[in-house]
Amino acid sequence: MVRNRTLGSRTFEITNVILLGLLLLSCLYPLWYTFCVSISNKAAANAGLVTIYPIGFSLTPYQEIINDKLFLNSFWISIQRTVLGTAFSMLVTVLMAYPLARPNREFKMRNTFMWILVFCMLFNGGLIPWYLTVQHYHLINTIWALVLGGGVPIFNVILIMNFFRNLPKDMNEAAVVDGGGPWSILFRVYIPCSVPVLAAVALFISVYHWNEFFNGLVLMNTSDKYPLQTYIQQLVVNIPVGTSLTPEQYKKLSELSNRTLNAAKVFIAMVPMLLVYPFLQKYFVSGIMLGAVKE
């Protein structure tokens, strides 16, 4: 243990603490500000008086959200999309990563498929061919358009493939000697040994499905099919026009502050990911690093 640190090391440590503290504040302040605006009264929010603490405590926006059927419907669609999308993408990603992690002598087309995947990751057909493909499969305006639209994350396939490649080869050979086939080795050996990277990738995919709004905007034709982020994007960007709110809803919105109501909806939209992350955080760093380090 080094007891007498040099002036340079202490300066380096203090600088790091200051920079990381500023970075932490820059990440947390938008969340706190959104929450403060959501529980402030209409006048203070409209006047821009809310900064670091709420002014005029009010839960009216949250009461309004509870009665907003369109918001709750979008919330439910986002939950379905996140659960189904994460499950589907994890299944496809693992099933693609496993054969690609095998030695070249066992899977001779491995390099060819790897080049195809990398090419598809760097270059794609564009928005119009992608939309026509989804339309051709009659998925427009269905939940499966959102689930399958970004269902194969190539970067995550490469991440899990590298993790599988770094697992001890003796473990695979022992499973083969015990009579294990490819499926049993995958589900009884590889997957139980890969919990950190699988948890990290599951977090990546679930955050993507929860926060993504563009697919919903393009692939859903009616607002009652919008996922939550698309609904919020439409509400925040186009609140005066283009929404399908009823006259009663417009009247209620006029009685509230758009800033407080929208802030409440944005804050509620962040809550699920804020609740999920602490359970997966312990796997997050190790899952990324173990896939990148080669012994």
Image (tube, rainbow, N blue to C red):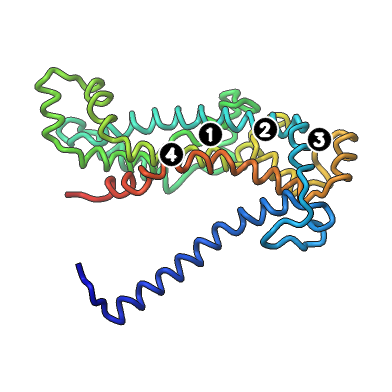
Q: Which mark is residue 74?
A: 2
Which class describes the residues within 10 Å of circle 1: few (<14), some (14-19), or many (20+)?
Answer: some
Residue at 59% over, 44% down: 270
Locate residue 150, reporting x and y percent.
50, 36
Look at the numbered disc 4 and give the secondary structure of its residue.
helix
* Image quadrant in which you'd find residue 252: top right
Mark nearest the camera among 3 and 4 is 4
Residue 272 horizontal/vertical position (percent): 56, 38
Q: Earlier in the sequence, mark 1 or mark 2?
A: 2
Q: CA distance from mark 2 to mark 4?
A: 25 Å
Most distant residue in the front direction? 3
Q: Label 3 amino acid? A: Ser
Q: Residue at the spot x=22%, y=27% of the render?
A: 189
Which amino acid lies under the numbered mark 2 shown in the image of this protein? Ser
Q: Residues within 10 Å of mark 4 (few under 14, many from 20)?
A: few
In terms of secondary structure, where does tag 1 sit? helix
User: Residue 244 shows which numbered tag?
Assistant: 3
In the figure, is residue 30 to the left or right of 44? left
Q: Nearer the viewer, mark 1 or mark 3?
A: 3
Q: Which mark is residue 149?
A: 1
Residue hosting label 4:
279
Mark closest to the chain's N terminus, 2 or 3: 2
Taking depth in this image into account, of 287 and 233 the one nearest to the observer is: 287
- Label 2 element class: helix
